[in-house]
Amino acid sequence: MTGLLEGTVGWPEETARAYRAAGLWRGETLGGLLAAWAKRSGDATAVVSGDERLSYRDLDRRAAERAAGLLALGVRSGDRLVVQLPNTAEFVVLLFGLLRIGAVPVLALPAHRRTEILHLAELSQAVGYVIADVREGFDYRDLAAEVVAAVPSVRQVLVLGDPGPYTALADVSGDPAGPEDAVPVAPSDVAVLLISGGTTGRPKLIPRTHDDYAYNARAAAEVCGLTEADRYLVALPVAHNFPLACPGVLGVLGVGGTLVMTESPSPDTAFALVERERVTVTALVPPLARLWADAAAWSRLDLSSLRLVQVGGAKCDTDLARRLPGALGCDLQQVFGMAEGLLNFTRADDPFETVATTQGRPLSPSDEVRVVDPDDGSDVPDGEIGELLTRGPYTLRGYYRAEAYNTTAFTPDGFFRTGDLVRRTPTGHLVVEGRIKDVVNRGGEKVPATELEDLLLAHPAVGLAAVIGLPDADLGERLCAVVVPAAGAERPPRLKELKAHLTALGVARFKLPDRLVVLPELPLTAVGKISKRDLVARLTSEEGPRP
Ligand code: OOB
């Protein structure tokens, strides 16, 4: 059971014992693993980030020094810190610094803004907030000032770069030989809190234990055939589960490979790194994969080192899947995963047709998967569409501090209701066919509809709001806000105004609607709820005028 963190639900003791007996959970902590990896791969390059190159030994030492520095600041085992850092070596150093002392990072994306960060800090009662100084014209220190003012638990702000009034991360360093370094951390403790994109209402936090996350990364590395010769480009935001542990950062370090960090996944920047560092593997979302495939035709840079590109986060359409290997000169792997746990991968020995047309099959022999009728919960036969339910050695048993929500998000016997509609093929591969959860998947970026609707309703000219996803050739789905003007409003709101309103409230830019539709009323279902299905159908067939 998870020891330190109240508000988390662990696996039943008997199940945990079975996962240990099967050798899936090895009783290791992620901090302890880094020390072991440093012994094994000492001089090998662990991380390349800009001009910086850290060997495994350097990384382990830097993490130990960071851990000592954190202890000296008063950070304790079980404390939560919201971490919002770009793809840099410092992310890896800090992550392991925290893991080593049992402090728990809440992994926010660089795109998150006031609304998201305040929520995460409050929900987790974070003691600290870790940021970069300025990125893409946004000064995170200004946001930190608001966080400190609004959330009293936040006592520390640590900054990568110019700290302003706060503490420089570079100064959070101590002597790792100090007596405080020996903080006991249990394998069953929560290692990180990931952010869910798939829940109703405000985003929920997903506790991942050392046991389960170490297994997740190790098994994913194995499925990808990762070896110490692999050099992995961290192109997606590293706080996301996919590049962090599927196999990503943790999987690569586990086999003694090299991480190449990039703050920009654009072909210009990324291709130059692929050439310079002889990158062999990376993970992309479908719109990026398409951009890379198109750009490769024109690029003079040498991409011949690439052997595997993983594509996931949203459905990779079959055309792109067929085109990608030729365009980039490497294998494709489809990945259908979720921060909550379950990962599906196509395998190197799958026929190409399977790689092109399915989203893979479960990672672990201990993953339990059911496909059920969403109405009555009964299992549907293979080939029929139903809701995917899952339970297993790296799938959560409950969101953090979400007792009421958990009663509906899980079955009584512990299966997680993914909200994804899938079809299972005779080979056990899954094809994602849709969704019943109220989320828009904008090219892999998840926008919980109700979260955005609540924010839209705060605008004086908005009476009713429904957020839906409409089909889009590039993003898979684009974000559409359907609103009914407020009774007293002089005129309907404009898209520009609603975007300005959301920006002023401080929401991540990827949550800004691409399109606004104003209607006199919203279609309702038989039980009187807004019928988003009708809205999507109507707007998809009309593709009416864009305001
Ligand atoms: C990954 O994780 P999340 O937590 O951002 O989003 C999970 C959801 C899934 O429930 C599904 O709705 C969608 O994203 N999704 C896909 C997909 N991969 C994820 N839908 C269709 N096809 C796919 N290949 O997105 C994630 C986590 C780990 C690895 C890869 C992706």
Image: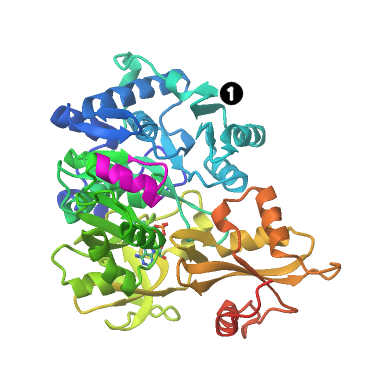
> Would you identify the image quadrant in which residue 57 lies?
top left
Question: Residue 362, relative to residue 228: is it above or below?
Answer: below
Position of the C terminus, as image quadrant, is bottom right
420 lies left or right of 453:
left
Query: Which residue: 57% across, 43% down?
Result: 117
The answer to whether residue 367 of the structure is visible from this angle is no
Q: Position of residue 63 (x, y in %)?
A: 33, 26
Q: Main structural element of the magenta stretch: helix, strand or loop? A: helix
Q: Position of residue 531 (x, y in %)?
A: 60, 79
The residue closer to the viewer here, 320 or 386, is 320
| Residue 447 placement (x, y as % from top left) | 53, 60
Residue 421 position, x and y percent, is 39, 74
Position of 140 relative to 409 (above/below)? above
Residue 424 or 167: which is nearer the viewer? 167
* In magenta stretch: residue 263: yes
Q: Which residues are magenta?
A: 261-276
Question: What residue is drawn where x is 61% and y is 37%?
Answer: 143
Task: Verify whether residue 509 appears in magenta.
Answer: no
Looking at numbered disc 1 in the image, what kind of residue is underneath it? Gly
Q: How many circles with numbers are drawn on the protein?
A: 1
Q: Quadrant of residue 140?
A: top right
Query: Left or right: where does residue 473 sit relative to residue 150?
Result: left
SS state under label 1:
loop
Residue 243 placement, left or right of 204: left
Q: Which residue is mark 1?
A: 164
Using a 10 Å C-alpha cutoff, classify the residue at mark 1 as few (fewer than 14 neighbours), some (14 to 19) or many (20 or more): few
Question: In which quadrant of this rendering is ligand 1 seen?
Answer: bottom left
Instruction: Point out the image quarter for the N terminus.
Output: top left
Q: Left or right? Give the position of 376 relative to 41.
A: right
Answer yes or no: is residue 451 visible. yes
Q: Tell me the residue at 57%/57% (across/down).
A: 511
